[in-house]
Image (cartoon, rainbow, N blue to C red):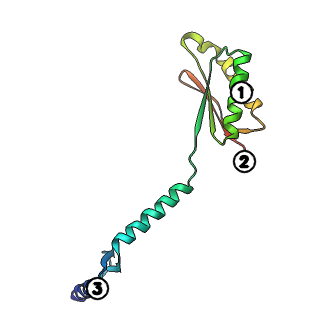
Amino acid sequence: MEAGVYATSAALEMARTAELDLVVISEKTDPPICKILDYKKFLFEQKKKQKKIRANTKKVIVKEIRFGPNTDEHDFNFKLKHSIKFLEDGAKLKAFVFFKGRSIIYKEKGEILLLRLAQELEDVGVVEQMPALEGKRMIMMVVPKKK
């Protein structure tokens, strides 16, 4: 144990003469592993690396399109155009039919509506999750096709 203390004190002395910091890398080993470096510069480099990693990660954007079970043709086409634009921009699309009150009896209409949307979006997107009923909403996820 004394050899470790001696090595650490010698390393501390070396760090002082070099006007740098002694940073303990691993305390579990005997003697502990240390490194002589400028600690502020080290922290700066770490932050720089983290920032670069965050800049390179792609953020997934999820856009939502809401339908009713009795959505009209014009409304469907209007929302279809928006869906196509969202998928072309690279965003995921969450299309759902919201059933209010007793309109839950039209589940089949809602599913047909979402499947029709999936068919129309075939050339720009791929269905990730088929229409599924979750509470009062029937949800379908569509992701953009790979270029």
Q: Which mark is residue 80?
A: 1
Q: Which residue is mark 3?
A: 11
Q: In the rendering, at what x and y percent does residue 99 appear?
A: 58, 17
Seen in the picture, residue 4 relative to 119 is either above or below; the reply is below
> Of the residues under marks 3 and 1, which one precedes in the sequence?
3
Give the residue displayed 59% in from the left and 12% down from the top. Answer: 103
Tag 1 secondary structure: helix
Q: In the rendering, at what x and y percent does residue 143 appear?
A: 67, 40
Q: Badge 2: few (under 14), some or many (20 or more) residues near its Cα, within 10 Å? A: few
Q: Is residue 3 left or right of residue 84?
A: left
Tag 2 secondary structure: loop
Q: Badge 3: few (under 14), some or many (20 or more) residues near its Cα, within 10 Å? A: some
Cα separation, mark 2 vs mark 1, equals: 20 Å
Q: Is residue 59 left or right of residue 17?
A: right
> Of the residues under marks 2 and 1, which one precedes in the sequence?
1
| Residue 145 visible in the shown view | yes
Q: Which residue is mark 2?
A: 146
Seen in the picture, residue 147 relative to 32 is either above or below; the reply is above
Badge 2 vs badge 1, beta-carbon distance below 8 Å: no
What amino acid is labelled 1 in the image? Leu
